[in-house]
Image (spheres, coloured by chain):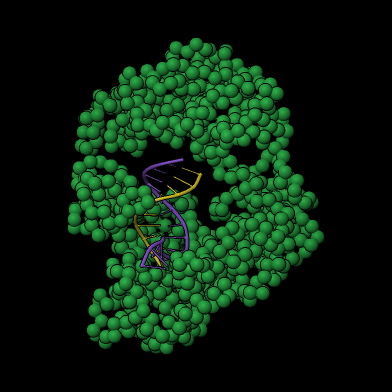
Chain colours: A green, B yellow, C purple
Amino acid sequence: MTNKLILIDGNSIAYRAFFALPLLNNDKGVYTNAVYGFTTMLLRILEEEQPSHMLVAFDAGKTTFRHETYKDYKGGREKTASELSEQFPILRELLDALAIKHYQLTNYEADDIIGTIAKQAKDKDFEVKVISGDKDLLQLVSEKVDVRLTKKGISEVMTYTPETLKEDMEVTAEQILDLKALMGDKSDNIPGVPGVGQKTAVKLLKQFETVENLYDHLDEVSGKKLKEKLENNKEEAFMSKQLVTINQDSPIEITTDDTKYQGYQEKNVKDFFKELGFNSLLNRIDGEEEETEEVQALEEIEFQVISEVTEDIFTGIDAFEIEILNESYHTEKMIGASIVNEKGKYFIPINVIEESEVFKKWAENDQQKKYVFDAKKITVLLNRLSIAIKGISFDILLASYLINPSENNHDVPAISHRFNEKNILFDEEVYGKGAKKGLPTEEKKWQEHIVRKTNMIYQLKGQMEQALEENKQLSLLMDLELPLALVLGEMEATGVKVDVQRLKDMGEELKERLDTLEKEIYELAGETFNINSPKQLGPILFEKLELPVVKKTKTGYSTAADVLEQLQGKHAIIDKLLLYRQLKKLDSTYVAGLLKVIHKDSSKIHTRFNQALTQTGRLSSIDPNLQNIPIRIEEGRKIRQAFVPSKKGWKMIAADYSQIELRVLAHIANDEKLQAAFKEDKDIHTQTAMDVFHVKEEDVTSNMRRQAKAVNFGIVYGISDYGLSQSLGITRKEAKTFISRYLDSYPGVQEYMKEIVQEAKQNGYVTTIMNRRRYLPEITSRNFNQRSFAERTAMNTPIQGSAADIIKLAMIELDHQLKKEKYQATLLLQVHDELILEVPEEELADISKLVVDVMERAIELSVPLKVDVEYGETWYDAK
DNA sequence: TAAAGCACGC
DNA sequence: GACGTACGTGCTTTAA
């Protein structure tokens, strides 16, 4: 058997562990988090790798031979926190207890020790694994030596072999030196060539292989500026290379033989763990499983593991669940499924479901009723298996959301606990969290958890149905949210097609413009800095350039757009900064961000609509968010040109409600004046200006209309007088006057505002047209702030929430009509008051009419609803 | 890894 | 009169 040597960069791992874990101390007041993290890692390595040799290397002292070359090596580093440094002696004791060799050498760093031993071991044909958090070590990678770098925290690692190194970094192990020589290393204060980052460095190395060769052929470098930078910093580059080079012939006094690992004395380790209070680690020493007290606290639950689905496991009223470990259900691996009903509890492996005709028949039969958690998720997951589920008759996620949207956790265990059902663990307790998240090794444990969840779905349905019934919200679930979930599921699964090339072209153009702007900003500032860092930008603007300070944040100067706008004209740098910010946002969020989530095979984007999140009943969209694609500024709006129909000859259609919130307000406030304005289809902002300023239509100036618009905006979103003053750039007092003049003009609205706040105080909640609820406990708070906020929310939620109800109704009806009339047109997106569809040419006229009709008739109000519809080749053109 | 600051939409 | 002020998602930087 070949010898296996594990080399650990002690300082690096201790440092990582220290920051990855909360700063806990044991009962003696000694900090132990770094030691604890280090220990769990060591135990895992010993178990998984069974090494024959092992060594932990430490840095020694403050200065090393590198300081002779460069006195500022590692300069500017924060002093190691005492909470960490005091843990190093304990760490050494721990290694002694585990009988693991550790070593340090004056004037040398842990890297050098590792490099030297690794070289010796390689010559003896050992298999070597290096563990660190420091990328410098990657230079040691070879056929015999792989390097594991901690990624997040300490438990997630990335293993580098020559192949993966090439893949991930695009360089060879030897070129790590050249890479660092060019790009430098901030944490070690290694200069490199200023202005050359990873991207440029890799590009140069692809062409020239090494730094030496690069400087021999400097005239072949493209780009005048770059050539200049390289020329001017030749010395720094070569020195940097020297600094990062690990000394593989350090004068160490140990040999590979000294690192032989022969196991530890259980008693030593246990005593040590007890002393430190590492009780949870004790049972890992003599091989006992980490059994938990919580598991024993649960009532036992029996279930069968199904290897072939037969009809007799179903009853016609079954709770059904499919488990995935992360939220992104469009791609996430399915772990297993479960059925729970009157007769039994079953775990079903996914491959059994995939191959089962019996299961498919059951799933697609709408007479077989299913209770689920998250109907939309289940619909999409089964769609991936070409199963079109029908008969979902209850969804405890949506039920929980409707019962109280302000709960911030609506997963099965959380809902269960709220309904006093405790026979279940939280996902975190079973799967872990963060980097450590995964299936427990014991199969039964996670299968049981999935069955328990399904069991909860089955148990909770009755109680939740009753709770909804009492609130008169059952119809809201059964006739609105649940049918909508299926519509949304289809929309998500369909996805939106993206013109990838178009997006990439935009990215290229943006990069060029950003490059230019960057240089201009540096020029105007008189120095280079990170424009993306408000912390660096602040001092430049307000100290160096001595611009007036408008606003401060808790960490320094505010450089937000509204601040910069006030500084416009005072210095040429301001306009450049505003433009830079805008373009940077477009590039990072909309070009790079969207490119990241496009599915390679189909060029489509599949967002997820969160149907159980917002406090008002609106949807939200994540991964990516397709509800905030730019529109207001032309440059950003062009992003929409990349959203195209998925089939040739098709068009994009966008239909949006005109002023739906204000129409809803006119309805629920029963304000005659506002109602009249909409019945006559007036321009509502002009009308508001007429009413607020008491002028005739022809005397409304554009400024008056702008101000009226802002007031309307404030009414719709429930902003305060302060908020209005900010958006109009006026004083709070003036804003207050505006608002009271508005309310005087619309007495119905004034009355409504008063009554709804009273109602909220009386009931503790407000409701929407479809009886959606939002609780407002702070409405009786003695804290002015909290109370005012609750009052504005009371006024605003029925407006915004009812508008959300209405478009949801429209979506359900539209989906129904499209299917009934067998149109090919498909719903793609909802953006709060707008629906986006893709439509074949021949259906354009029909669908345009249908969409408008359905949306305008979604509900009958005392004022008409109005919908504008447009179509075009891309989303951009549907305007 | 979390918080802060910023910017996009409705 | 102070207080710190629509709701979301996501990017980058920074500090821990």
Q: Position of residue A261 (x, y in %)?
A: 62, 18
- Between residue A499 and residue A231, name the one nearer to us: A231
Q: Residue at x 62, y 57 (%)?
A: A411
Whether residue A767 sits left or right of residue A499 in the image: it is right
Position of the C terminus of chain A, as image quadrant, is bottom left
Q: Is residue A332 visible?
A: yes
Residue positioned 38% across, 81% down in the render: A743
Q: Is residue A5 left or right of residue A581?
A: right
Q: Residue at x 40, y 77 (%)?
A: A659
In this view, the residue in front, A619 or A32, is: A32
Quadrant in which residue A67 is drawn: top left
Residue A337 position in % (x across, y down): 68, 53
Seen in the picture, residue A530 relative to A14 is either above or below; the reply is below
Q: Which part of the image, by quadrant, shows the N terminus of chain A?
A: top right
Quarter of image, res A283:
top right
- x then y, percent, for residue A508: 31, 49
Q: Is residue A343 above or below residue A108?
A: below
Spot occupied by residue A377 in the image (x, y as percentages of width and height): 59, 59
Decide which of A523, B3 is in the foreground and name it.
B3
